[in-house]
Image: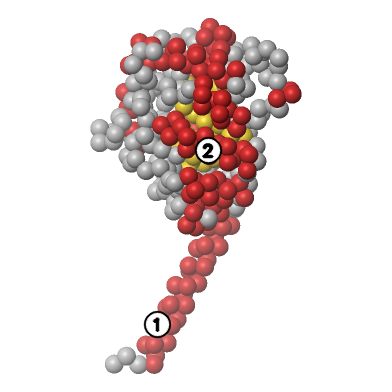
Amino acid sequence: MFGIHHLHYVILLLGLIGLLFVVHHLTRFATNPRIIPISVNYHLTRACNYSCGFCFHTAKTSHVESLSNAKKGMALLKASGMKKINFAGGEPFMNAEFLGQLAKYCKETLKVESVSVVTNGSKVTSKWLAKYGKYLDIMAVSCDSFDDTTNVKIGRGTGNHVKTFMDLCEMCKEHGVMFKVNTVVNRYNFQEDMNAAIDKIKPFRWKCFQVLIVPEENGSENTLRDARRFVINDEEWRLFCDKHKRQECFVPEGNDVMASSYLLLDENLCFLNKGVAKPTRSILDIGVAEALTDVYWDEEGFQKRGGVYQWSKPDASERPAHPELEW
């Protein structure tokens, strides 16, 4: 029969389990001090109109949060110390009005230091920039080659990407938005000399990424993208970097610093642990601080790759009179 002494053992066992639970959480907080989410990438959609073969945030779902929920998420992040928000995808301009309203809210209401967007550029219009450009500090436009034959091989457009890119560069200057270039260095472009094009464009920042394999997104024949054919080795990566290191705007990111040095928020407002662990629960459900306790963020890598820089555009009174003059 179940006696008093058995009940005593059960109580002791439950107490021990409770103690272990407390110790686990205290240890977790001790080894993972509070993260300040100074810079966050919000991948607001996975949908995209391009088909880049190395994409590491693929169209697994079509979900996009409501604008009200997205605003709540941004407010929570700002209250937790966020100074820069970068909207990404997928292609964020698949939801252009949503994007514009969110950028306006972050800059006008929350007073976020830097509001930026990463885009392939194909769906950006002068009308959108006239309406929302004032709320945007940076537009980062992806361009992996200045030869459209190479862009087509990669999956970036159907043959007119370079013209679209160049036109958008001029539009950003006209609307006072800082122009940044993002390039993924891969098997098809690592030998290309892009110096002449960069000299002409004069972006304030040129971010070059060594193509990255994320197993659950682009790492096999069973994922929506299989990026293995795009991979380059470290020597080929260094060859590209050495060729372009004279550019003052050049910011290289190899796999050693890229993988976990970003705070990534997905379309469900959950932090991602790409290639490391499953996503957190939504920050709307558990808050930012609790969500971040389950995030592996390489803060040293973030600093090493120059994660903090001059990311706010000057006031209108400080801008040059001629758009061809850089800030």
* Residue 309 shows in this picture: no
Q: Look at 71% across and 16% down and name the residue there.
A: 320
Q: Out of 16 and 86, give the one closest to the viewer.
A: 86
Q: Out of 220 and 95, give the one closest to the viewer.
A: 95
**Does 101 appear above or below 324?**
below
**What amino acid is found at the position of numbered circle 2 in the picture?**
Gln
- The residue furthest top is 196
Left or right: residue 133 compared with residue 327: left
Q: Which quadrant does the C terminus fall into? A: top right
Callout 2: SS: helix
Q: Which mark is residue 101?
A: 2
- Callout 2 environment at 10 Å: few (<14), some (14 to 19), or many (20+)? some
Q: Look at 44% across and 43% down and name the residue there.
A: 266
**Does 158 appear above or below 49?**
above
Q: Which quadrant does the N terminus fall into? A: bottom left
N-terminal-most mark, 2 or 1:
1
Q: Which mark is residue 171?
A: none
Q: List the residue tagged with mark 1.
A: 10
Residue 271 pos. (x, y %): 47, 46
- Callout 1 environment at 10 Å: few (<14), some (14 to 19), or many (20+)? few
* Residue 77 shows in this picture: yes
Callout 1: SS: helix
Dividing the picture into quarters, in which one does residue 95 lie?
top left
Mark 2 or 1: the one toward you: 2
Q: Look at 59% across and 40% down and name the residue there.
A: 106
**What amino acid is found at the position of numbered circle 1 in the picture?**
Val
